[in-house]
Amino acid sequence: MTERLTDSAAPPQAPASAAGSSQSGTIDHTARNSRVIWLLLAATFVVILNETIMSVAIRELMVDLHIEARDAQWLTTAFMLTMAVVIPITGFLLQRFETRPIFIAAMSLFSAGTLLAALSPGFGLLVVARVVQASGTAIMLPLLMTTIMTLVPAASRGRTMGNVSIVISVAPAIGPTISGIILNTLTWRWMFWLVLPIALVMLVIGIRRVENVSEPKLVPIDVLSVVLSAFGFGGLIYGLSQIGATTDGSALPMWISLGTGVVALALFILRQLRLQRGDRALLDLRTFRSLNFTVAISMMVASMIALFGTLILLPIYLQEVLHLEPVQTGLLLLPGGLLMGLLAPFVGRLYDRVGPAPLVIPGSIIVSGVLWGLTMVTDHTPPLFLLAAHLILSLGLALLFTPLFTSALGAVKPQLYSHASAIVGTVQQVAGAAGTALFVTIMAAGTAAGTAGGASLEAAAAGGVRSAFFAGAIISMFAIVGACFLRKAAPEAGAPVGH
């Protein structure tokens, strides 16, 4: 069948639950599918933006709420922790429920959390609000990816996944920029007040216009898997997030959390391997039987470590070493985020034509080259050098994200789409937490060593930043090796249901 969708493609055969009458024509399905995808893209952009919007606001929050830096980091840690716990469950949710009610639930949670954050009188309630926000955010990305894989034929997925890359890479990248601009004239609460009406508009539009395009089925949920998943992924995220915040006398909780996470995750994997024999796994790991999926996920880990590590390190370096204001920091990082957004659709079209290798090989080399270049920063490095480095890094990441997402999800069978989407989302959170923890920990250690050696605070901090980027540069070399093994999935392996 050859139905086509504007800027993507309609499924060769629409799901029965959403197809309407047998007389409904191709144009109706085209309009419906295009509308659903673009609404999901817009909503996902709004919710993911909030993952990094707090990074530049930490200093103001510390002053306004009278808290320490370690406490303030909980606003990001709690968000990532919730994402890591909820995302693995979305594989079940996307099979059990239809598209529209899941969308409404996700946007309702996000909107409620945003309102609660704006009204929070103190730090404790603000953390709770971030947890509620993250619960909605965690559902949106797997919902978007699973819907695209269901509706869009393999030959056109690169173009559509290019739009997804805008959401996944640009939204976190411009979060610090937006918060810096807001904080230049307004208080931190306006970061939520300005997002709230946008979220409510998306919710209302979704209630009226999002249609069901999936076929729900009665699948059981394994409660033990949910518990193991929460302790496994949650323990890892919390432990990793505490690495950079621990002191000599408080490292025990971090090690307990990491140990609990590793043990629970091992038990979770064993449980899924047993349950998936009867198609009852909470997170089906048969996706990793595809070499392409495994390679793409491994490269995604390295890319996310580079992205989130850089996003956390550059603002600290620009403000603490070069003494730039938050708004200047945000504006300096803005061009790179915009560049990723502009390039993503073109990269998607190139992927459809030439496959992943001509894109991911130069992309991984560019990312690695920039990280090696950043190992040379000092306390006198011109901001323009950082601007150029961030732009080139954004170019490399733009060449990576779309091919990685498309190759990974296109390599699995249609019945595993929801599980693959959940795995991609979970890997993002764990890799993001690992990148943040790694970069911050090495930076802190390097700064302490420099200070002990008699260097000025700025020179010592610059030395810590160089050490952190050196570790990131080494990790980036593994992505170059992986890029040589990535192949474009065969069309029949990733065909929409009914193809």
Image: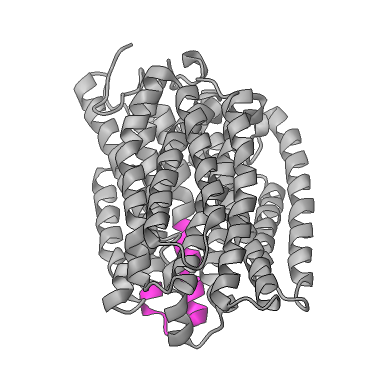
Instruction: Classify 326 as above or below 421.
Output: below
Q: Quadrant of the C terminus?
A: top left
From the image, give the main secondary structure of the stretch colored magenta. Answer: helix
Q: Which is nearer the eye, 24 or 71?
A: 71
Magenta segment boundaries in residue numbering: 117-136
How far across and down, in percent of the image, does residue 455 sit? 62, 76
Residue in the picture at 56% in, 47% down: 372
Residue at (69%, 47%) from the top-left corner? Answer: 225
Residue, x 43% and y 50% (percent of image)? 389
Vertical position of residue 362 compared to residue 169: above or below: above
Task: State yes or no: residue 132 in magenta.
Answer: yes
Q: Is residue 277 left or right of residue 472?
A: right
Left or right, 274 with reference to 54: right
Q: Quadrant of residue 464?
A: bottom right
Q: In the depicted view, which residue is nearer to us: 434 or 135?
A: 434
Determine if residue 170 is in view.
Answer: yes
Image quadrant where one finds the N terminus: top left
Q: Is residue 153 a member of the stretch shown in magenta?
A: no
